[in-house]
Every structure is written in structure tokens, then in C-alpha cells.
Amino acid sequence: MHRTTRIKITELNPHLMCALCGGYFIDAATIVECLHSFCKTCIVRYLEANKYCPMCDAQVHKTRPLLSIRSDRTLQDVVYKLVPGLFTDEMKRRREFYAAYPVAEGECSPMAPTFPPCAVP
């Protein structure tokens, strides 16, 4: 006989929320040295000025800290499944942003992968 246990989302929030912005993960990224996760934009912005994890002070790559973060699609999928409406709201925000700031023809867009991949100047 299987018993199902209901867990409130508030009990899971510490595992689904970014310690830097306080919101649910958007484009979750994990630091490979310590496995702490954050929103991608939050951790990139943080690592521009710091070389240590904001949670545990583990040193992130000495010279190029951005090499030590990886997208965490599994965690992001879990967040989108557990938080009602988050995926829909995020996609709406992105559509509105790209409508307000269209990409010039021939330039790279993060929403549309290209082949060959875009070169970073």
C-alpha cells in the first residue's frame, strides 16, 4: 500500500529560490565547485565583482569565475513544475522584452539558436 505525502510549496522554497535575488530560479545555474545554485543573471552579476560563492565562500575559478557555472536545466524544470504560472509569466516577460528591444537582422538572439553559432566580439 502506497501512502502519498503532501508537501507545501513553502517547505520547498529554500531549494527553489535564489539566495541573491530572493525569487524563484530563472535560468538556474550551479557553481561546479560547491554545487550551490542561483539565477543565471544573479550569479553572473555577482561574479563580476567577487570570486567566492555567496553561500559558502568556496573559491570559484581564480581568474575566470564564469567558467565555473553551469546551466541546471533539471533544477529549472523542477521549479517550473512546482511553481504554478512561473513558466508562462517568464515567457511572457521575454516576449515583451524582445518586442520592445528587437534584435537587428543578422545579429545573435539568445532566444533563437543559430547555425553556425554566433561569434562573441
Image (tube, grey):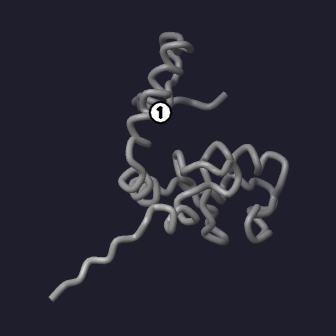
Task: Name the residue at 80% across, 69% down.
Answer: 57
In the rendered view, does 93 fall on the left or right side of 20? left
Q: Where residue 102 appears, x then y in whole percent?
A: 52, 13
Quadrant containing the N terminus in the rendered view:
bottom left
Q: Secondary structure at mark 1?
A: loop
Q: Is residue 47 above or below residue 102?
A: below
Measured as percent of width and height from the top left, residue 60 is found at 75, 63
- Badge 1: few (under 14), some or many (20 or more) residues near its Cα, within 10 Å? few
Q: Which residue does the numbered mark 1 point to in the structure image?
A: 117
In which quadrant of the rendered view does residue 56 lie?
A: bottom right
- Identify the residue at horizontal 43%, vertical 65% (top origin): 8
Closer to us: 84 or 100: 84
Position of 32 with respect to 5 (left or right) is right
Residue drawn at point x = 40 percent, y = 58 percent: 78
Q: Residue furthest right?
A: 49
Question: Where does the image place residue 106, in percent across and percent down from the top left?
Answer: 49, 14
Q: Please, is residue 37 above or below residue 90 in the view? A: below
In front of the other: 59 or 10? 10
Q: Residue furthest left?
A: 1
Say which residue appears at 60% left-offset and 69% top-offset: 35
